[in-house]
Image (tube, grey):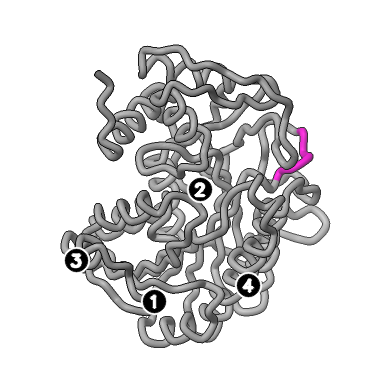
Amino acid sequence: MKILVTGTAGFIGAALAEKLAERGDEVVGIDNINDYYDQSVKYGRLKKAGFIEKLEEGKDISYGEFLTSTVYPNFRFIKLNLDDKQEIMKLFQHEAFDAVCNLAAQAGVRYSLTNPDAYIESNIIGFMNLLEACRHNDVKNLSYASSSSVYGLNENIPFSTDDNVDHPISLYAASKKSNELMAHTYSHLFGIQTTGLRFFTVYGPWGRPDMALFLFVKAALEGKSIDVFNHGEMLRDFTYIDDIIEGVIRVIDNPAQPDKTWNGKTGRASTSSAPYKIYNIGNQNPVKLMDFISAIENKLGKTIEKNMLPIQPGDVPATFANVDDLVEDLGYKPDTPIQEGIDKFVDWYLEFFEVDQK
């Protein structure tokens, strides 16, 4: 297939684009390479994928300029903003995609409390532009990143895609729920096969510097303390990056179909009479935050000083994915153990940042 992957300088997008290119798909990646977090990690991901010429010269990538990977000749990258509707439309008209996977977004729960505009521009306007581009260019296969954050005040454990998610507690979560509603509308009106993926705390090598694992390892190696929110009474369904990518690829290969049994009175929230579907992708094995920190300490061979703090606005105390639909429909369940995933992340971190532990 010819597949557009958005957010290809990002954590999940970079990993997905490489995996699709490895198996032979023609991949076009876009990203605006913003400075929300350390851009050296974003450029590092692009270098890993073979986009090295300008980066090695110390030059930035020009807006709207195509680069071709030296590792994967079937993988091209272009720097674009999703909220640039004119350029997005031109891209779709020129490339004739078979499928689109939208992993570009303004991420972060806490950042949405202080910079709400960024979430509207990227997550709402940007996603709207993709829907319109799919509509007007006959692209029927659209998958996109949602988030476990949409569950908000929901207290049913484990979280099911059929639970009520009408009570988000951050603008980030509200923007992701909006994506699901917008996608359903376009599925119903225009027959676009849309699949939303509610990711649960993704971690692993090349991960985001604003996430807990990155922050904890960095602080530990620098001999600094870490902030532990809700006094450590948190549960997270940490999901390793390779498991996430396997789930996403299976979704791309199996686009949503209408649920012929669905009706407005008894129909499930995760399906529709339109070609629309929602999946959780999580490890289905939540880990206590203190156990997560202990796994980092085990790998580093040192104790980390901890600042015990109250829960932060927008945070939920626990996440736990019900992935029954993923297993039933796609025959897949994430299963990487937390210690294995943390070990791989720490090994990557030490190599990428050239940390000498001696």
Q: How crowded is mark 4: few (under 14 residues within 10 Å), some or many (20 or more)?
A: some
Give how far apart the Cα atoms at labels 2 and 4 are.
Answer: 31 Å
Q: Assign a secondary structure to mark 2.
A: helix
Residue 170 coordinates in the image, percent (x, y): 73, 49
- Which residue position holds label 2? 329
Q: Name the residue under label 1.
A: 63
Residue in front for this viewpoint, 275 or 278:
278
Span of residues in magenta: 151-155
**Mark closest to the chain's N terminus, 2 or 3:** 3
Residue 325 drawn at (x, y percent): 57, 44
Q: Mark 4 points at which residue?
A: 125
Indicate which label's residue lies in the foreground, 4 or 1.
1
Instruction: Point out the tag, 1 or 3, that comes first from the N-terminus.
Output: 3
| Magenta part, dominant SS | loop
Mark earlier in primary sequence (2, 1): 1
The Cα–Cα distance between marks 1 and 3, rounded to whole angstroms, is 15 Å
Figure quadrant of the C terminus:
top left
Residue type at tag 3? Glu
Does residue 100 lie above or below 113 as drawn? below
Please report the residue visible at 46 percent of the width from the left and 83 percent of the height from the top: 87
